[in-house]
Amino acid sequence: TLRFWTSSLNAEEKQTRKRMRDPWSLVLQFVSLTLLLLAIAQLQWGSRERLGRDHALLIDTSAWSAASQITGGKATILDREKQLAASYLRVIPARDRVMVVRADSLASPLTPFTADRAQTQAALRTLTSGFSALNLAQALAYAQQAQRWSGGEPGEVVYIGPKQIGQEENARPNLKNLRVISVPINRDNAGIVRMSVKRSETASGEWQASIVIKNYASRQRVVRLNTRFGSTVFAPRVLNLAPQQEKIAEYVFDTTGSGDLMAE
């Protein structure tokens, strides 16, 4: 018979439930779970102020940054922005990390969050003015996202530039940690706001172009618009613009080949 073997196994099972076989194993499991929870919580010793903060430095490199300063000379708005950025880097604590971001139509990071001031200064020296308009909302959103992903204590989002944004953008962004360092500009000028070209819907080979001109000055002015497509030069347009007024110059031309549409 095998009945007494079965009874023996049952007795052994009942006996093992009355005592703990490996108490140290249980202790190690509790310690491991505790360390895992601390790692998930990202526990850090000391205060956050001692560890430094992460700042996003947005340098305006839009078309406006190529304009000359009010004081005259060859210095541009971008040159002044670089000076103000260097001054900001000197006053923040050395333990704070800074990310330099080129801001125009697209926000492009030039450095990660770093406390290496030599790296940030080198990134500032490489900045050049672009030809596009400033997309401020996209730049601010990128800076906030970068601060969230850095894993550190968020610092300031610093914008340095002339504050020239499109009418469709919010002039007062709702951002608590935003610092704006404004650069004065000479607004007594006029310029091309945007250009667009599309194929005609009625005639084959016909194209329609529109150029928007704006007078940024506080006085009325007359501007001369010269436009050409490839080797074809269009008749100059003379536009009389009131203060802060926009006007559209439209062109219709035929072509079967490619070329550059240029206006000044």
Image: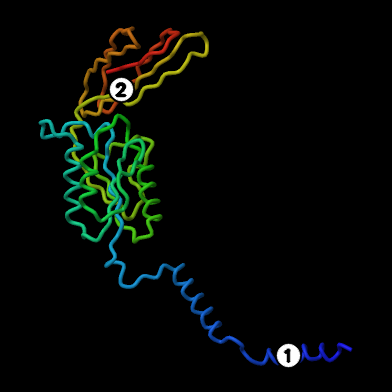
Q: Nearer the viewer, residue 210 or 228?
A: 228
The image shows residue 256 at horizontal and vertical percentages of: 45, 8
Q: Nearer the viewer, mark 2 or mark 1?
A: 1
Image height of 63 relative to 92, above or below: above
Q: Real-space Cα distance between discs 2 and 1?
A: 94 Å
Residue type at the position of mark 1 = Glu
What's the mark number on residue 12?
Answer: 1
Image height of 156 relative to 200, above or below: below
Residue type at the position of mark 2 = Ile
Q: Nearer the viewer, residue 104 or 113?
A: 113
Q: Nearer the viewer, residue 5 or 174?
A: 5
Write the residue at 27% across / 28% down. 244
Q: Secondary structure at mark 2?
A: strand
In the displayed structure, does residue 36 sit left or right of residue 45?
A: right
Q: Residues within 10 Å of mark 1 (few under 14, many from 20)?
A: few
- Label 2 belongs to which residue? 213
Q: Quadrant of the C terminus?
A: top left
**Residue at the limit of the structure toward the front, as seen here:** 1
In the displayed structure, does residue 8 sit left or right of residue 124?
A: right
Image height of 205 relative to 41, above or below: above
Write the residue at 24% across / 48% down. 120
